[in-house]
Amino acid sequence: MNKHQIKAETVEETTALGEKLAKLLQAGDVVTLEGELGAGKTTFTKGLAKGLGVERTVSSPTFTIVKEYLGRLPFYHIDAYRLENSEEDIGLEEYFHGSGVTVIEWAKFIEEFLPEDRLNIRINYIGENQRELELTSTSEHFEMVINELLS
């Protein structure tokens, strides 16, 4: 697993990184997002959605756990925050191996259910609008995606 770091100086840059990444993703790809409250996970996710051609407004699915959107590929936005300490299998695996792209905020709360092959992103707050994104690949596929993103 290789780690790569990207700095985003503005909210717009965080969104643009998500949009650029989305254009490199394919059906069945899973992206996890970690970071403190307000770090920019949902901002990044909005960029992913835009890059996938989603036209609906994207918001955090805090109370519904999963929101589904249509774009170039189906886009599944999961917020696992409320699943902390949950022992229950709520069938998320069907999203991970489906025909769309899945992004999971607060993925650490469902670690045991996550597929091994995924792109892990940690967003760190470093200033009012500045963020550092730490991307960790778990496979050759995601290593190629990250290299393309950085080029």
Image (tube, helix red, strand yellow):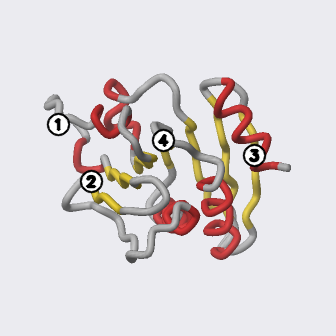
Which residue position holds label 3? 5
Q: Is the C-beta separation of discs 3 and 2 under 8 Å?
A: no
The span from disc 3 to disc 2 (Cα, nearest Å) is 28 Å
Q: Is the C-beta separation of discs 1 and 2 under 8 Å?
A: no
Three-letter amino acid code of the residue under disc 3:
Gln
Q: Earlier in the sequence, mark 4 or mark 1?
A: 4
> For the residues carrying marks 3 and 1, which lies nearer the camera in this image?
1
Q: Residue 137 at what x, y percent from top left?
A: 64, 31
Q: Disc 3 on helix, strand or loop?
A: strand
The span from disc 4 to disc 1 (Cα, nearest Å) is 21 Å
Q: Disc 2 on helix, strand or loop?
A: strand
Which residue position holds label 4? 27
Q: Residue furthest right?
A: 151
Q: Earlier in the sequence, mark 4 or mark 2?
A: 4
Q: Quadrant of residue 37?
A: bottom left
Compared to residue 63, the image places residue 56 above or below, namely below
Q: Residue 122 at what x, y percent from top left?
A: 58, 46
Q: Which mark is residue 66?
A: 2
